[in-house]
Amino acid sequence: MSGSPSDPGSGPPPRRRRPRYKGTHPRRFDERYKERDPDKYPDIDAYVRAQGRTPAGTHVPIMVAEVLAALRPAPGEIVADLTVGYGGHALAFLERTTPDGRLIGLELDGPQLEATGRRLAQVVDPARVHLHHSHFAGLPKLLAADGLAGVDIVFADLGPSSMQLDNPARGFSYKHDGPLDMRMDLRRPRTAADVLRTITCDELARALGEFADEPAHQQIAQAIIRHRSEQPIVGTEALVDVVLSALGLTRRTWRAAVAAGKSRLHPAARTFQALRILVNDELQGLEQLLRVAPWCLRPGGRLGILTFHSGEDCRVKHALRDGLRGGVYAQIAEEPQRPSPAERRGNPRSTSANFRWAVRAAAT
């Protein structure tokens, strides 16, 4: 008889066990189920931030107040957010441009773009948001397709998102074991492992020096080339171990140095940064953006760019100064703005941020 006690399909579904982890606190991304479900655990966000961490699977937009103050979004304006990410800055722009302002959002990370589209649709009229799976250098074509001669604001946040850094499957972070991928756009054919398989020692050393200011660029490049001749480097932990070995360290001696207060920056941080920039052609893309951005702005339109290392900031600084001298821009930020001490404490990933802005000259 249906529904009888003996019928195995009649009872409630079995209760799913929560992920188990060693110790008293979760450490791995897949163990932090509370941080990844803030709707179900509303107190977890404040708890994690009080520890100086960013909740797993989320992203805290950086310098929002400073960005809004410099770019001055107003009701009815059109904003092009070229790195829409989790939508933090996008939401702030949409709020300031209410009721009929529009957002054109570009994002290379396809899965992130889908998730952000769902997030924005819950709080904003979808007619105000146009999202594109595109590199920011494609902005002129997108504007032309929409019949727009220009926008009021162009904004780009060049840092990788916390969702990318925290997810081991993406391979961006030296903190998590995972495949050595690092592609922001999963349509790209080459992963970080592919790059390390084919790059020459001189090319790698140059990238480590130019893209990450790595003092030991020669030693690390040589160690990577030696290691790959015996075994391909395909995982993040393997790359960390090679870098540590090149510097005469082990995981144990590095932890001891941190405990003794002798060091803070992880020895592999610069190597991971340089490799990520190589995989995604980030600096070439930035140079393309700096060439096309002023011509995507209406007269009096504002450009804002958040950078996170000296190679990016130097390119932005010189492009804005050249634009000012050439009459393309009427005004620029002479010095970069930095996150406040309170923001750096509350969101350590903001520490290296620099924000620069410019105002397009009026039509002559």
Image (cartoon, helix red, strand yellow):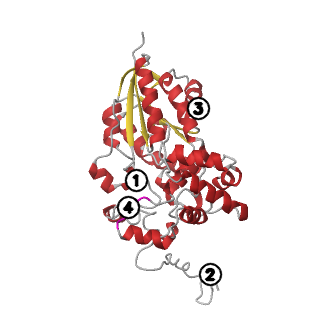
Secondary element type, mark 2: loop
The residue to which callout 4 is attached is 53
Q: Nearer the viewer, mark 2 or mark 1?
A: 1
Mark sitting earlier along the chain (2/1): 2
Amino acid type, callout 1: Arg
Q: Residue at x 31, y 41 (%)?
A: 65
* Corner quadrant of residue 47: bottom left
The residue to which callout 2 is attached is 9
Whether the residues at callouts 1 and 4 have beta carbons within 8 Å, the answer is: no
Amino acid type, callout 2: Gly
Whether the residues at callouts 4 and 2 have beta carbons within 8 Å, the answer is: no
The residue to which callout 3 is attached is 138
Mark sitting earlier along the chain (1/4): 4
Secondary element type, mark 1: helix
Q: Nearer the viewer, mark 3 or mark 2?
A: 3
Amino acid type, callout 3: Gly
**Residue 349's disc number:** 1
Whether the residues at callouts 2 and 1 have beta carbons within 8 Å, the answer is: no
Q: Which residues are magenta?
A: 261-265
